[in-house]
Amino acid sequence: MKVVGSDGGHVGTVDRIEGDRIKLAKSDPAAKGKHHYIDMSEIDAVKDGEVCLSQKADDAKSRFN
């Protein structure tokens, strides 16, 4: 399932749920070969087969290491 920011920008692809976080797939081009995590509290909605975040895509990705 795709993860997108509030602006519709691509953030990543769900790998799995780990506790209260979504683990993003490292195979997604946005991940640059590393797993990244999104807190469940950052999710605004799940609709049309996508996880929609409450912040813009660039803001979410800015926290990736």
Image: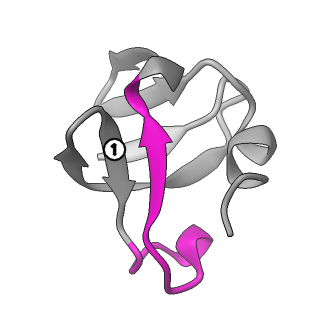
Is 47 magenta? The answer is no
Q: Of residues 58 and 8, which is closer to you in this image?
A: 58
Instruction: Give the x, y percent position of residue 16.
Output: 20, 53
In the rendered image, residue 63, in percent from the top left (x then y), is placed at: 72, 52
6 to the left or right of 19: right
Q: Report the side of 61 relative to 22 (left or right).
A: right
Q: Position of residue 44 (x, y in %)?
A: 49, 13
Q: Residue at x 21, y 38 (%)?
A: 19
48 or 37: nearer the eye? 37
* Above or below for 2 versus 40: below
Q: Name above or below for residue 15 compared with residue 46.
A: below
Dot 1 amino acid type: Ile
Residue 43 sits above or below residue 24 on the image: above
Q: Nearer the viewer, residue 39 or 47?
A: 39
Mark 1: secondary structure: strand
Q: Relative to residue 58, is residue 45 drawn left or right?
A: left
Residues drawn in magenta: 26-40
**Mark 1 sits on what residue?**
22
Spot occupied by residue 34 in the image (x, y as percentages of width and height): 49, 79
Where on the picture, by quarter, is residue 39? Answer: top left
Colour mode of the rendering = one colour
Residue at 63% x, 33% y is 5
Residue drawn at point x = 20 percent, y = 45 percent: 17
> Dividing the image into 4 quarters, which one contains the C terminus?
bottom right
